Image: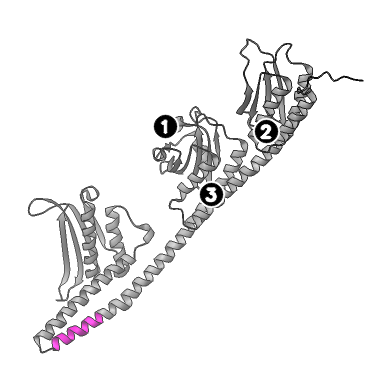
Amino acid sequence: MTTNTREPGVPSGLSVLLEAVLSVGTELELRSVLQHLVDSAVALTGAAHGVLDVVDPGHGSLLESVSTGTPDTGPSPAVLAVPIHVQETVFGRLRLTGKAAPGFTDDDLDLLRVLATQAGIAVGNARLYETARQRERWIEGAAAVTTALLTGRAEDALTTVAERARLLADAAAGVVLQPTEAGGMEIVAASAVDDAHSLLGTTIQPGSAVLAQLLTGEPVFIDDSANDPRMTTDVRVRFGPSMMLPLQAAGKLIGTLALPRRRDARPYTSVDHLLATQFASQAALALVLADAQAGRERLAVFEDRDRIARDLHDLVVQRLFATGMMLESAQRRARVEDVRDTIGRAVDELESTIQEVRTTIFALQQPPADAPTTFRGKVLRETAGAAAILGFAPSAQFTGAVEATVGEPVQAQLLAALRRALATASRRTAISRIEVAVDATATLPDGRPAVRLTVTDDGRREDGAEGTTVTWQSPR
């Protein structure tokens, strides 16, 4: 009869191994699998400390370390180490230290190898599960970006792409760069955990090694932005690992999507590279489609506004003008002074109405999505709108610093006066030339600095004379 000398409650090496294998193999979340592996290895061998160094299979760089127990601070602690293989690829290295005398044995090594083999299977399953979830998140993110851009809910398409990519990549910032006229690249949209505005305007100068690769449509992967000699921007010192991905569709390079992490953040894996690159490709296609759709919508709106303007001009204005002529004829035949005065006032009202309708026609002729932001641009927009009615483009001349010296309230008054003058001029016959002059160096009679608008045309007036000059001025 064999006597079991094992103390009650103290499991044998085999039972501990079985428990370790079960605890490692029942998890699907990768971090939990790794922690169970280190904990089980320490319990199995009696080590004081265990650590698992995880490496990127695509680059061999250290991704993270998982540990348990108290490190041995002795001069040369005995170390028991085994590699963890996942499908014949080194996933990491498990190291144990601090076992009491007589130290680690061959049995410990055998048990640890068995555990490592089973752990490799568990880690492989967990990685597949994590990769599937990660891929699902990126696919959902790309679909959300596409939906947002194509449904018109995104106010800024590039910022939408940067924001969604930053969240998916767990990055400190997401930025979109576009080529500059000088041959470099500039950050035009940014999303960041903090202070995204400070990133805008950052430029990669021409001649950069990174820029040369990006302009060819090739992605760039950086392990440490702060110390990589290829990185030349001032903001690089704030970041560590980074991915720079071309936004390219139909052979057209729209820009570059950059996803930098903080300096102390974990590096990107080869799976991250693949998924982010696929996201960038789909986002670029969505940007192209959204731009094309927006163009079609702008064209449809403009065509509709143009049709309304033509209808107003061809039907409403002509009928009002004909009615005015009939009233003027009736006014000449009227014998009672009060009747003539009443008809005269009605004619004046009709003329005023015609002028307002013509002003509305000019406004309708402007593309709604191309509204200028500068004062010069607004003046030029009004003259271009008049060209659609006149059949020729009025000329425009500016004197002085009109942008810097003319305030917005005065700008609005001047533009209203310009619209009235152009509408009145368009009613004259035999008109072939209109000259618009805006002078920001004018002076009022009392000496105050002013802005003066002068509109001159060569049309024939009602009295038969040719040429009219309208002047409007106001303190700046």
Residue at label 2? 33
Helix, strand or loop status at disc 2:
helix
Could you tell me how far apart the alpha carbons at marks 2 and 3 are, in whole angstroms?
A: 34 Å
**Can you tell which mark lies on residue 286?**
none
- The mark lying in front, picked from 2 and 3, is 2
Residue at label 1? 234
Mark with earlier residue (1, 3)? 1
Task: Check disc 1 and give the amino acid type.
Answer: Asp
Task: Check disc 3 and give the amino acid type.
Answer: Ala
Is 180 in front, or is 345?
A: 345
Residue at label 3? 283
- For the residue carrying disc 3, how many other residues have a C-alpha within 10 Å: few (<14), some (14-19), or many (20+)? many
- For the residue carrying disc 2, how many other residues have a C-alpha within 10 Å: few (<14), some (14-19), or many (20+)? many
Q: Are marks 1 and 3 in contact (CB under 8 Å)?
A: no
- Whether residue 40 sits left or right of residue 378 in the image: it is right
Give the percent coordinates (x, y) of residue 431: 23, 71
- The mark lying in front, picked from 2 and 1, is 2
What residue is drawn where x is 50% and y is 54%? 148
Give the percent coordinates (x, y) of residue 460: 19, 73
Q: Quadrant of residue 8?
A: top right
Q: Is residue 253 visible?
A: yes
Is 461 in front, or is 128?
A: 128
Residue range highlighted in magenta: 321-333
Mark with earlier residue (2, 1)? 2
Give the percent coordinates (x, y) of residue 113: 76, 25
Q: Is residue 433 visible?
A: no
